[in-house]
């Protein structure tokens, strides 16, 4: 099956309302141009799952009314502080939360990646999380005595969405050291990727790139979008726009301020494509 080449708007259109959408953390490859396109098309009911945490893109989707639920180890803007629209949604009860941990989410994604219904994990035994997750099961280790272990269900996103520096004409996508993107692509039913550049070189033919490349088998569609992660940064390509992110924090503390931000940076002339 060949990997489709789409515009960023058409790529965003492949994410159906109500989809379980797998997203990476801000320090990885965030497809911000595609997220803005998802908001422009008025997506509804998305269930966001982090790999393993989310920030700016989740805050925007929640604030814009595109997301109905979140499963994450955290939703935070890191050094900039709490995610304002996520925090407001939690306080108002307008977003459903599945609280988790980094190892638990990785285990769920890895289960889907391996095609098994669950994976065991030991480290969350004794935590309060078990009282709030009725989909996690504690069983006795069948190979030991008096040795409980937690079973975590597979997490299979309907769609994984992220941004990467490079793809080739066959649809292979180079992600470098960002292995959580590889896990997302393996686990998801569909993988949609925006990239900085599409090269004529075969990324799988060179040992220097092959180890950090997602084979086209796991990629559904691509969109070439220069600086598609901005205002976030992309490792080896460009730094985050700190002035923009700080301005976001100052502006979106209120619904009215967030609406102004959307008008200027998502719907208006200054919306980055």
Image (cartoon, grey):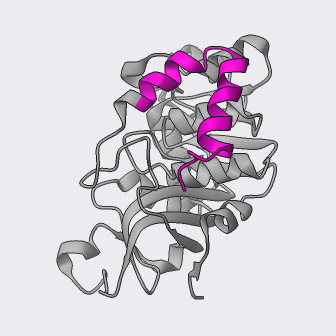
Residue at 44% x, 41% y is 231
Q: In the rendered view, would you say 268 is above or below 177? A: above
Name the outermost residue toward the top. 91
Which quadrant of the rendered structure holds the C terminus?
A: bottom right
Left/right of residue 182 with respect to residue 116 in the rendered view: left
Residue at 72% x, 11% y is 91
Residue at 31% x, 87% y is 202
Q: In the rendered view, would you say 182 is above or below 87? A: below
Give residue 99's quadrant in the image: top right
Residue at 78% x, 57% y is 16
Q: Position of residue 129 (x, y in %)?
A: 59, 20
Task: Find out whether residue 14 is within the magenta segment.
Answer: no
Task: Find out whether residue 251 is within the magenta segment.
Answer: yes
**Prevailing SS of the magenta stretch:** helix
Can the viewer see residue 114?
Answer: no
Give residue 256's quadrant in the image: top right
Taking depth in this image into account, of 109 and 10 the one nearest to the observer is 10
Q: Position of residue 149 (x, y in %)?
A: 51, 33
Taking depth in this image into account, of 157 and 147 the one nearest to the observer is 157
Q: In the rendered view, would you say 85 is above or below 212? A: above
Can the viewer see residue 233?
Answer: yes
Q: Position of residue 239 (x, y in %)?
A: 29, 43
Residue span colored magenta: 244-273
Q: Position of residue 29 (x, y in %)?
A: 42, 51
């Amino acid at each position: 099956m060949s990997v489709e080449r789409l515009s960023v708007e058409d790529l965003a259109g492949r994410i159906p309302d109500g989809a379980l959408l797998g997203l990476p953390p801000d320090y990885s490859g965030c497809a911000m141009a595609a997220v803005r396109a998802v908001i422009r098309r008025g997506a509804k009911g998305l269930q966001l799952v982090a790999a393993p945490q989310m920030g700016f893109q989740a805050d925007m989707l929640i604030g814009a009314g595109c997301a109905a639920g979140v499963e994450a180890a955290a939703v935070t803007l890191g050094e900039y502080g709490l995610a304002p629209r996520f925090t407001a949604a939690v306080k108002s009860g307008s977003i459903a939360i599945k609280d988790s941990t980094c190892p638990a989410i990785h285990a769920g994604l890895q289960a889907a990646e391996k095609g098994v219904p669950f994976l065991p994990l030991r480290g969350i035994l004794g935590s309060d999380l078990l009282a709030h997750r009725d989909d996690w099961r504690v069983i006795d280790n069948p190979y030991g005595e008096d040795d409980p272990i937690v079973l975590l269900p597979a997490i299979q996103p309907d769609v994984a969405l992220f941004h990467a520096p490079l793809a080739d004409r066959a649809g292979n996508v180079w992600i470098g050291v960002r292995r959580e993107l590889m896990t997302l692509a393996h686990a998801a039913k569909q993988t949609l990727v925006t990239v900085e550049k599409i090269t004529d070189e075969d990324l799988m033919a060179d040992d220097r790139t092959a180890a950090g490349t997602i084979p086209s088998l796991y990629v559904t569609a691509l969109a070439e979008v220069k600086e598609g992660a901005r205002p976030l940064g992309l490792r080896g390509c460009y730094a985050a726009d700190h002035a923009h992110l700080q301005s976001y924090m100052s502006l979106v503390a209120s619904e009215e301020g967030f609406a102004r931000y959307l008008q200027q940076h998502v719907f208006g002339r200054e919306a980055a494509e």
